[in-house]
Image (cartoon, helix red, strand yellow):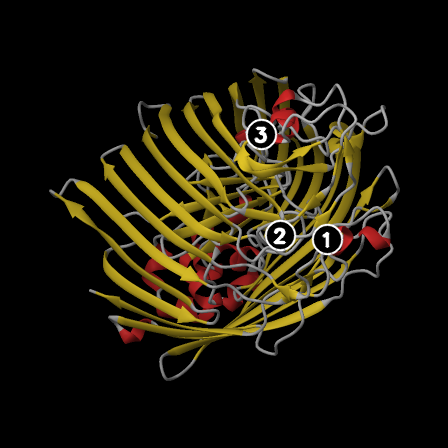
Amino acid sequence: MKYRHQLLFALPLLLQAPLVFAETDEENELALIYGSKPLVSIATGNDLALNRAPSVASVITAEDIKSMGAKDLDEVLETVPGIHVSRSAINYASMYQIRGIGGPSTNPQVLMLQNGIPTNSIYRGDKGKSWGGLSLENVARIEIIRGPGSAMYGADAFSGVINIITKTAANAPGTEFGARAGSFNAKDAWIQHGGKLNESVDVAAYLHIGRTDGFKEIIAADAGRLRAATLAPGPVNTGFDAIDAHIDLGYDKWRLRSDYTQQNNVGTGAGISSALDPVGTDNNERLSADLSWKDPKFSQYWGLGFTGSYLQHAEVADNYIMYPAGAIFPNYTVTAATPQGVLNLLGNPAIGTVIPGLFPNGMMGSPARWERQIRMSGYATYSGFADHNIRLGLGHENLDMYQVRTLKNFWLRPNGTPLPTGAVVDYSAIQPHQLPHRRINKYLYAQDEWSFARDWMLTAGLRHDRYSDFGGTTNPRLAVVWDAAYNLTAKLLYGKAFRAPALLEQYGVNPSGNGNPNLKPESIETVEAAIAWQATMNTQVNLNVFRYNIKDTIRTVANAVAGTGSTFQNTGAQRGDGIELEAVWDASSKLRLTGNYAWQRSIDEATNQDAGYAPRQHINMRGDWQLASGWLLAPQINWVADRKRPSGDTRPQVPDYTTVDLTLRTSRSMKQWDFSASVRNLFDATVLEPSPSGTTPLTVPIPNDLPMAPRSLWLQAIYKL
């Protein structure tokens, strides 16, 4: 009687399939009524129904990606509740602001995984400034946790975790050829194959090649004006060339994966120093491989698994023009403390000689870094205790920035002001921008999923990490999940997480932000409550509320001795709260409507004002309409609003914007061919992302914010053998 009203919705299914229902239990009947739930593994390491996962999670499938017409990872993440993709002036690199946590130039608070293995750079602690536009043709699904994940994943699982799961032979059968072309002279081509080798080895392979000139929106004023030399007004520099290759081999319980990703000629965006640079580029290369073995039924109660991985990452800059020709800085008087290497470059002038601060050919640099990451991990699961599923794990990480190179034509004085020293030369022995460093981490964790009562699940976890340079940190999690009804699940969640100091913050050499080897990790504590409600057989509604507190935020602080620059310190704190609402409605067999609304408030506790940069309100909606002619039409609306400035920045808040995207693609009835066309920003709305603040309105590097892409069009064709 309790579920009479739900069963009425399923009457047509009951009439069509009486034999099926006769053979299932009550829970399976309700699953048939309401539809099966998507599975997620990122929350616990085990596959769980999304509504029962002990975290606030989202899953984006390959079919979802096609429907929304997304070409890269950034476009997908903008549709997830609580996430906004902003931009840095440097390289126009994408920044994933989750629940208002993020900054003006980088976001090391988000842990990026590929097939469960961390890919963050150890230099800045983030995904790397040139890797936002990841191609998606080889992506099977994207799993996202909003909230802390350090109890499972350790460092940088701070505001969220994003796991990109690539395709295997099982979900990419056959051979596929694809090509895409569109605005900004963008061209992409790829080939993908999945099949068997000798009937025992599963093989999946993928190769993607692409390039774009990038959009050329105009920066009206930049930081060059502060140095009497500017190329503004002028266009941003956002082009790049890309290669992405992947192979996946599966044999019995073993899996071997390898990736090669290269992005060359990556434009400098609005400039490395927020001064336009039309010629500087970045060249980046990433090679990774991992070998895993797992047996979930190793014995009656035990399951075992291990993974070993290797990641090699290089970032090599090519001729950054940090300020254009004619840039003027204060003159410098040679003293006894002037380094001998600098004196040699200046022609060994006498003490008291005044060196002009003019850069007649521009202020130039070409930094480069090479790092390798070796990880080993293992886990065991035990189900021998009634109503318990225990998971134990340990691991070892060798994180090594083994080579650094610094080419430039200036010396940074103790106060952070550059002094021209002539031609571009190798400064690696005189004043490197970063010191090489190797970091070792050893960790262990335990997790228990306990069904302590009917329809109740308690998940408790604890992980301890021990780093060779900044010590240990312990992070717990606790989650209670209650299946209040077959169509309603409620969750109460608590978690603590940490962000490890990046090597730039600990060992960087730059008077405007010197490294501090005594830094502690940032920490966050989050409390969340969530419900997942299957309102009808056609309608799913999710709601969650959250509150967090961040401590020991790492920021630059002016040194006590005047004129000696600044140093990274644990000085900041931030608190925040908000709500996230999402719904999916299958209005008919041919129309699905999805949408979400997020509201958040993030407060910098030092000023008791908005932390700035991130939107307080965000709405994303999409419709998937199956046309009678065998095509799918998918309009999408994205509204971003209420982006405040941080304390001290008196500019008006960043303007709100609304964009409309439209995608038209073939449905499965077209068999071998798949065609699609998409228009992004259909009505050519003006979209701005916030630029960094200055100490006064007159010293804001880019006063009019960062202009984003105008209306664009692309066409795509895929042929499947």
Between 82 and 46, the one nearer to me in the picture: 82
Gap between marks 2 and 3 measured at Cα: 30 Å
Position in image of residue 681 (x %, y %)? 58, 73
Residue 139: where, in percent of width, then height?
Answer: 39, 52
Q: Nearer the viewer, residue 119 or 417?
A: 417
- Specify the amino acid type for callout 1: Ala
Task: Return the mark for residue 89.
Answer: none
Counting residues from the start of the chain, the first of labels 1 and 2 encountered is 1
Residue at 44% of width from left, 28% of height from top? Answer: 373
Give the residue number, with chain letter if any, for mark 2: 271
What residue did someone put label 3 on? 155
Q: Residue furthest left?
A: 198
Which one is closest to the eye, mark 1 or mark 3? 1
Residue 223, numbered circle? 1
Question: Of the residues shown, which amino acid type is indicated by label 3?
Answer: Ala
Q: Is residue 259 visible?
A: yes
Q: Position of residue 658 (x, y in %)?
A: 67, 70
**Mark 2 or mark 3, which is nearer to you?**
2
Q: x, y (%) of residue 303?
A: 36, 26
Q: Secondary structure at mark 1?
A: helix
- Mark earlier in primary sequence (1, 3): 3
Check disc 3 and report its element: helix, strand or loop.
loop
Measured Cα–Cα span from mark 1 to mark 3: 34 Å
Is 287 drawn above or below residue 468 in the view shown? below
Q: Is residue 252 shown left or right of residue 109?
A: left
Mark 1 Cα shell of 10 Å, populated few (<14), some (14-19), many (≥20): many
Query: What type is the residue that disc 2 sits on?
Result: Gly
- Pick the residue in front: 115 or 233: 233
Question: Label 1, label 2: how many angstroms apart (C-alpha)?
Answer: 9 Å
Q: Is residue 334 above or below residue 628?
A: above
- Judging from the image, what secondary structure is the residue with disc 2 in? loop
Q: Are marks 1 and 2 in contact (CB under 8 Å)?
A: yes
